[in-house]
Image (tube, helix red, strand yellow):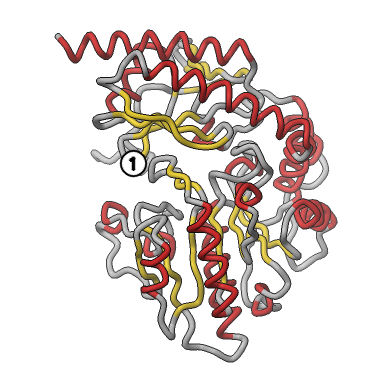
Amino acid sequence: MSITPLMPVYPRCDVRPVRGENCHLISEDGRRFLDFASGIAVNILGHSHPGLIGAIQRQAATLMHVSNLYGSPQGEALAQRLVDLTFADTVFFTNSGAEAVEASIKTARAYHQNGGDPERYELITFNNAFHGRTLATISASNQEKMHHGFLPLLPGFKYVEFDDLEGAKAAMSRHTAGFLVEPIQGEGGIRVASQAFLQGLRDLADEHDLMLVFDEVQTGVARTGTFYAYEQFGIEPDILATAKGIGGGFPLGACLATEKAARGMTAGTHGSTYGGNPLAMAAGNAVLDVVANDEFLLAVREKGERIRAGLEQFIGNYPELFELVRGRGLMLGLKMRSESRPFVVHLRDNHGLLTVAAGDNTVRVLPPLIVGDAEIDEFFDRLSAGAASYKAEEAA
């Protein structure tokens, strides 16, 4: 037998973490890595937060799973907190971001079809987006590398250039149900949507009774310096998908919606065996206990500005390697002049610094939101050493 026990769908590297301490990961061979990837924006409280650990331990000893056929005091409590903190009136809990986006797509379609207009089923999405790996969410993306081997795609999606309002308007038709957009593209290269673009989508949705769906799986839960990124644009979506940081490392996602948007999501229309289980709800509540306050959000913005300013200064020393810095809060991107993946590998293997490659030749910088001054200093020490040695290797 040649296939590995773990299905070989990931090109796994030789970093094999077995333990985490705050902003560091320790591999089974004892190597210590500074984690500025955070499980791709998941471990927002780092790797050993006592509040999160304690909440999971206490709940595990009490009740881990119960069917959604029964009442959920744990789910009701977390849903109410999210409703109080956001635009939403109602919440459906999932186990992942892809499931949250799936639920959002279904909610947008159900709004029209259960409202008597079955011809409205199409969502306009945007090039280089990443919405997940299910059939519906890969169909919502124009990235052919995710389509290969899984054709035919599901119908019901039109692709338009990101940040192109006129293109979105031109793509509208009798079948349009709404827009699905990341306010900041993560996998696409930390590309921030313009104010005019998102406001324009909101205006089009209002004018034509369409659903504006935000994918905030990566941007949400304090990552960009506000609880959700939509707050920075002065508009509200009708539906929002969230995951990653909301569980701090425990599998958890959610679809948030207004009462109007959720009018089609009635009893029996959707479900999840594990979604909203008591253990996940305990994790979600523990995360909100830490991040859902003005003081914490301000600290994220301040740390984000410190790192951004440092990166702006840093790239000036290596104009042949780096082009610009972009992003918000602690979701930052370092755009390179060539493919970013080799540099990410170089930082990891030679300097013990974990970052994440993204599209548009971008290195993603996604530290835990509890990162401190010492870890920020360590980040710049490792990054500077990495850039110097990488430049030397390229020149050799």
Q: Residue furthest bottom?
A: 116
Above or below residue 331? Residue 261 is below
Q: Residue furthest left?
A: 396
Q: Using the rendered view, name the quadrant where residue 339 is placed.
A: top left
The quadrant in which the C terminus is found is top left
Q: Decide: few, some or many residues near mark 1? Use Cα within 10 Å; few <14, some 14-19, many ≥20.
A: many
Using the rendered image of the protein, determine whether residue 396 is visible from the camera's viewpoint. yes
x and y percentages locating residue 166 in the rendered image: 39, 67
Left or right, 387 with reference to 91: left
Residue drawn at x 47%, y 50% as measured from the top left: 193
Above or below residue 107? Residue 379 is above
Left or right, 340 with reference to 237: left
Residue drawn at x 44%, y 40% as measured from the top left: 190
x and y percentages locating residue 67 in the rendered image: 73, 62
Residue placed most toward the observer, 301 or 227: 301
Q: Which amino acid does label 1 sit on?
A: Gly
Residue drawn at x 53%, y 44% as measured from the top left: 218
Using the rendered image of the protein, determine whether residue 348 is visible from the camera's viewpoint. no
x and y percentages locating residue 389 in the rendered image: 29, 9
Left or right, 229 with reference to 73: left
Above or below residue 149? Residue 120 is below
Left or right, 359 with reference to 122: left
Q: Write down the residue under mark 1.
A: 359
Above or below residue 318? Residue 64 is below
Element marked by disc 1: loop
Residue drawn at x 62%, y 33% as measured from the top left: 44
Q: Give the tally of numbered discs.
A: 1
x and y percentages locating residue 304 in the rendered image: 58, 27
The quadrant in which the N terminus is found is top left
Q: Using the rendered view, name the quadrant where residue 104 is placed.
A: bottom right
Residue placed most toward the observer, 164 or 64: 164
